[in-house]
Image (cartoon, rainbow, N blue to C red):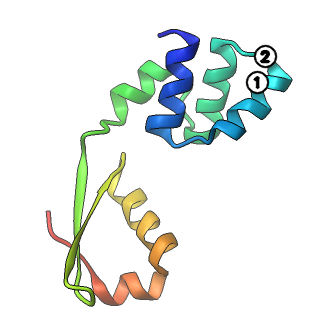
Amino acid sequence: MTTDEMYDYLVGEVGVSEETIQIVTSINGYSTETMEDILYAVTGYRDFDQYMEECDPSTVYTFYDQFRKEKISITTESEKEAWCFLADTLGTSYVMENIERID
């Protein structure tokens, strides 16, 4: 994987902002080592191969919002992270009262 591919993956798949990458690379240089350092800081994985092997981006968790009467689909590496994402986005009490895992 090239440095540019790592950059694109961090932005597109991991969710790191371009501004964050620009700040870090302006300090540490634009290199594969820097991209792996960013990956580690954000995800805890030391390299892209390990991250891609263990975090299948095609895994989708589906929840049902009983209040809004709609399905919510989240792609994430674990169910716990999906619940945390929902709690951060909608509020913990809302999630506990209205969200049900359906898949």
Amino acid type assigned to the residue bearing label 2 in the image: Gly
Foreground residue among 45 and 69: 69
The residue beneath circle 2 is 29
10 Å crowding of disc 1: few (<14), some (14-19), many (20+): some
Above or below for 7 versus 20: above
Question: Could you tell whether 72 is left or right of 33 in the image?
Answer: left
Q: Residue at x 38, y 67 (%)?
A: 83
Q: Residue at x 27, y 90 (%)?
A: 67
Asked which quadrant contains residue 43, the reply is top right
Quadrant of the image occupied by residue 55: top left
In the foreground, 27 or 37: 27
Q: Residue furthest left?
A: 103
Give the labeled residue for mark 1. Answer: 25
Who is closer to the viewer here, 25 or 99?
Answer: 25
| Labelled pair 1, 2 in contact (Cβ < 8 Å) | yes
Q: Position of residue 57 (x, y in %)?
A: 31, 38
Secondary structure at badge 1 equals helix
Q: Amino acid at mark 1?
A: Thr
- x 67%, y 26%: residue: 37
Please state the horizontal and vertical placement of residue 68, each as a whole percent of the image: 26, 86
Horizontal placement of 95 versus 15: left or right?
left
**Quadrant holding the C terminus:** bottom left
Report x, y in % for residue 31: 68, 12
Q: Residues within 10 Å of mark 2 (few under 14, many from 20)?
A: few
Distance, label 1 to label 2, CA atoms, is 4 Å
Report the residue at 51% width, 71% height from top.
88
Residue at the top extreme, as displayed = 2
Indicate the position of residue 11 as horizontal and vertical percent values. 53, 35
The relative height of residue 92 versus residue 80 in the rendered view (above or below) is: below
Residue 98, above or below 38: below
Tell me the SS state at disc 2. Answer: loop
